[in-house]
Image (spheres, helix red, strand yellow):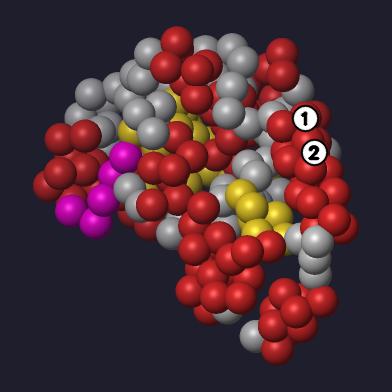
Amino acid sequence: MWDLKRTVSRANSLVCISQRTYDDLVTALPEAAHKSVVAWLGPGLVPPSSFDSTVSGRLLLIGGAAHKDNESAAKLLAKLDPSWLTGITGIGVSDEVQSIIGEAFGPTFGTWLKSVPDEDVVAAYRDSEFFMLLGKDEGFGLPFVEALASGCQVIAFDQPLTRELFGNACTYVTANDEENAKVLKDRPSVPEAVRREILERFSWKKFADTVIDKARSGEAE
């Protein structure tokens, strides 16, 4: 907290990567409000030409950090056993995730990758029809945007950040298993036009322009 206070006091301009980040910052340090602006990031390592809606039935999980909460995603999939799911690819997921999926679906259902080059991550996005991340503590959630840019159907926990970023271009689950069973009974299928429209929000050029404009206005102050 001390480092954050020092950063706010010394900075002329601050750029927050989501409204949620801005709200958290201003709640903690109200003096940050007048010098802060929100600018969404671009789609990470995924090139703009990557959008390709596949019908592979595969679902992608990424990350082993606690805040990713892929363990909850694995437990939900194991409990619901959706008919549309044909396989799971996990990149850097925990041993617990692998164990849950293996016990529920069999030892060959999951493909588990550890440290892979960027091009293999992009390939995993493009080979997957679905991307699931149920973490509730993302500051922005770059993998969500990368998945959307790759043409994946995104499945996320219903919370302010995901609603802010994806609106109606995402399939949402909650802590209610009964409701989740209804939501995921049928194949997640947000229309491509809706996903492409939301994808237009995320641009490195827009981000850079906002940063430059805010920096210049901060200097003027």
Query: Where 16 sits versus 195, above or below?
Result: below
- Indicate whether residue 54 is drawn in magenta: no
Q: At numbered mark 1, what does the secondary structure look like: helix, strand or loop?
A: helix
Q: Residue furthest left?
A: 178
CA neighbours of label 1 inside 10 A, class few (<14), some (14 to 19), many (20+): few
Q: Quadrant of residue 139?
A: bottom right
Q: Are marks 2 and 1 in contact (CB under 8 Å)?
A: yes
Query: Where 195 sits versus 62, above or below?
Result: above
* Mark carried by residue 205: 1
Q: Which residues are magenta?
A: 172-176
Q: Nearer the viewer, residue 76 or 134?
A: 134
Q: Is residue 32 left or right of residue 154?
A: right
Q: Main secondary structure of the magenta part?
A: loop
Residue at 63% across, 31% down: 202
Residue at 85% across, 56% down: 220
Percent position of residue 179, x then y: 15, 44
Percent position of residue 208, x then y: 79, 38
* Mark carried by residue 208: 2
Percent position of residue 9, x then y: 75, 79
Residue at 57% across, 70% down: 25
